[in-house]
Amino acid sequence: KKGGYVMIKDHPCKIAEISFSKTGKHGSAKAKIVGIDIFNANKYEEVAPSSHNLDVPNVGRKEYTLVDIQSDGYVSLMDDQGNTKEDIKLPEDTIGESIRSMFDDGKQVVVCVLTACGIEKIISGKED
């Protein structure tokens, strides 16, 4: 289903488009799935028989309060229970820049962390 998640070539992807071909003289209907990697925005394609199953990644989102930004780009985060996490790097794009500027202005910042396949990435930040 469009908007869902699927594993394409060992990358967790969000389905951007899906199309089905008709059954041919020999063989079954095929599904062409185009997905965009949820971590680096690369585009991947998969063609599979429509009767086959595909792997679906377990994608989770969690919000953390930003405690500190280290000079090497790693951030200190705290969850609702007070547990700290210091193994995620601030993204080096417009999202990372906006989070850094809000933090530098002394604002309370809440970041959303996307998790799938053992990979974690900050995908958004907002003022609390």
Image: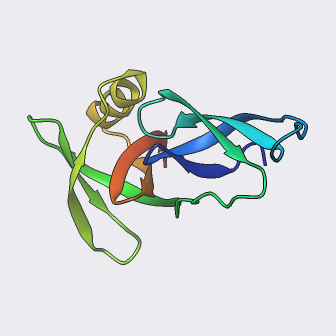
The answer to which of 8 and 77 lies nearer the viewer is: 8
The answer to which of 8 and 61 lies nearer the viewer is: 8
Q: Residue furthest bottom?
A: 81
Vertical side of 53 occupied by 75: above or below? above
Residue 113: percent from left, percent from top: 42, 52
Q: Residue at x 82, y 47 (%)?
A: 28
Q: Residue furthest front?
A: 26
Is residue 63 shown left or right of residue 96? right
Give the total number of marks visible in the rendering.
0
Residue 61: percent from left, percent from top: 51, 58
Is residue 107 shown left or right of residue 56? left
Q: Residue at x 37, y 67 (%)?
A: 79
Residue 41: percent from left, percent from top: 48, 29
Q: Residue furthest left?
A: 71
Q: Residue at x 37, y 34 (%)?
A: 99
Q: Residue at x 49, y 49 (%)?
A: 128
Is residue 122 shown left or right of residue 21? left
Vertical side of 36 occupied by 80: above or below? below
Can residue 108 be seen here? The reply is no
The answer to which of 82 and 112 lies nearer the viewer is: 112
The answer to which of 36 and 128 lies nearer the viewer is: 36
Name the image quarter holding residue 51: bottom right
Task: Tell me the colour scheme of the image.
Answer: rainbow
Is residue 54 shown left or right of residue 50? left
Can residue 115 be seen here? The reply is yes
